[in-house]
Image (cartoon, rainbow, N blue to C red):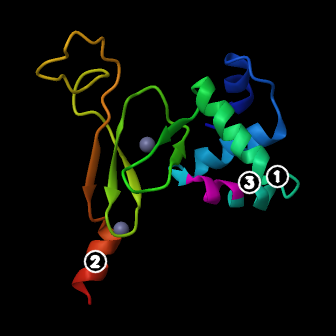
């Protein structure tokens, strides 16, 4: 089933524009892309959309909660359209590939600190670091 991006935009009171639809569509098909990759994807389909427009759309969609921005330490910011479920990520140290990791149990925050210092916690940010299957395979065949 195709996600209804126009309805998503209307649900957060954002005007439906071609650049916004283009970014949401590209993110749906290519989760965890960085800004440069997103610009290339969008301009491949819509050559008239400017770099600045893609930056602006990513910021607007992130602010509206339709897009989640993740930034693993030492890596470029990545974007994804899977939001609101507090899922985590596994990142390859070699090539930077990213995959989703669902929470093992319970609801967000799925990790409960031993001491919350009185804070009301609504998110737990966890990044698993390792080697992706492709890089692991390349290493063993060298
Ligand atoms: Zn890798
Ligand atoms: Zn993700």
- Distance from label 1 to label 2 (Cα)? 39 Å
Instruction: Report crowding for label 2: few under 14, some 14 to 19, many 20 or more residues within 10 A (C-alpha).
Output: few
The disc, 1 or 2, on the residue closer to the chain's N-terminal end is 1
Residue shown at 61% from the left, 27% from the top: 63
Q: Quadrant of residue 75?
A: bottom left
In front: label 1 or label 2: 1
- Which is more N-terminal, label 2 or label 3? 3
Classify 10 Å Cα crowding around label 1: few (below 14), some (14-19), many (20 and above).
some
Upstream in sequence: badge 1 or badge 3: 3
Q: On the rendered structure, is 5 left or right of 43?
A: left
Q: Which mark is residue 42?
A: 3
Magenta span: helix, strand or loop, mainly? helix
Identify the residue position indicated by label 2 in the image.
137
**Quick check: marks 3 and 2 in contact, CB under 8 Å?**
no
Tell me the quadrant of the picture where the C terminus can be found.
bottom left
The residue under label 1 is 50
């Amino acid at each position: 089933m195709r996600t209804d991006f126009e309805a998503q935009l209307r649900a957060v009171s954002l005007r439906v524009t071609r650049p916004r639809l283009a970014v949401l569509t590209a993110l749906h098909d290519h989760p965890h892309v960085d800004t440069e990759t997103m610009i290339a994807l969008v301009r491949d389909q819509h050559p008239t959309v400017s770099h600045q427009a893609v930056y602006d759309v990513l910021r607007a969609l992130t602010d509206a909660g339709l897009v989640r921005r993740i930034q693993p330490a030492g890596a470029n910011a990545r974007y994804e359209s899977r939001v609101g479920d507090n899922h985590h990520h596994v990142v390859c140290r070699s090539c930077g590939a990213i995959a989703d990791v669902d929470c093992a149990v319970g609801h967000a925050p799925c990790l409960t600190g031993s001491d919350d210092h009185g804070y009301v916690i609504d998110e737990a940010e966890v990044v698993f670091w390792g080697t992706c299957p492709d890089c692991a395979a390349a290493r063993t065949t060298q």
